[in-house]
Image: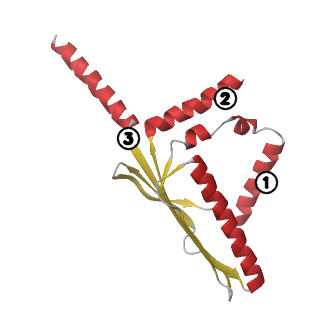
Amino acid sequence: MDSLYIILILIAGIVFFIAFFLQSKWIIKIKYQFPEMRDAQISVYLYKWCVIRQKNLRISNQAEMEKGFIHFYKLFREKKLHVLKEIRLQALLKELQVLEFKWQTKGGTGNAFTTSITSGTIWAVKGWLVGYLSQHLQLCGKPQINVQPDFQSARLETAFSCMISFRLGKTILGIMRVLKIKEVRK
């Protein structure tokens, strides 16, 4: 009889731990600055406890990024990546909350005319990105974006900071919904 109680307590403890883990709130902080840092810093938190502190991810150089993009584009054109078209990420993106979004850019080309055109283009890209994020994600705060043109010198500086929050159980359910939609379409 005592062993039955121990087994029941053990099962209840395992169920409680799984329920706690699935309801846990995870926060990911991403920080990147150019040209000061060549790595993106990522920190992962479980509630307020830091699980991974400032893991540096190496950013590829321009030539490697271009080769990867060209390879991806070739696969996409050859319809080898048809799975990407079938997966609907909206169900998964709805579960993410953006707690903080900051992106400041300073720079210029050395020429006032081309600097103004470049600054306007950067504003347009940032505005489109914030619009996309606000449409598909839950924005908890107002995004802070800024473009400061430098008409005198040719330089580029950018600082990006983002904090994303999600519940592990809801994210797993979102992934399961995405996979189920893909399975039904076959």
Question: Residue 61, located in which quarter of the rendered image?
Answer: bottom right
Depth check, front residue: 134 or 33: 134
Asked whether the beta carbons under mark 1 and mark 2 sit within 8 Å of each other, the answer is: no
Q: Tell me the residue that label 3 is attached to.
A: 24
Q: Which mark is residue 154?
A: none
* Location of the C terminus (image quadrant): top right
Q: Secondary structure at mark 1?
A: helix
Q: Can you say whether 118 is above or below 153 in the image?
A: above
Which is closer to the viewer, label 1 or label 2? 2
Q: Secondary structure at mark 2?
A: helix
Q: Tell me the residue that label 1 is attached to.
A: 70
Q: What amino acid does circle 1 point to?
A: Ile
Residue visible at 62% across and 56% down?
Answer: 131
Q: Residues within 10 Å of mark 2 (few under 14, many from 20)?
A: some
Which is closer to the viewer, label 3 or label 1? 3
What's the distance in space between the residues labelled 3 and 1, CA to CA? 39 Å
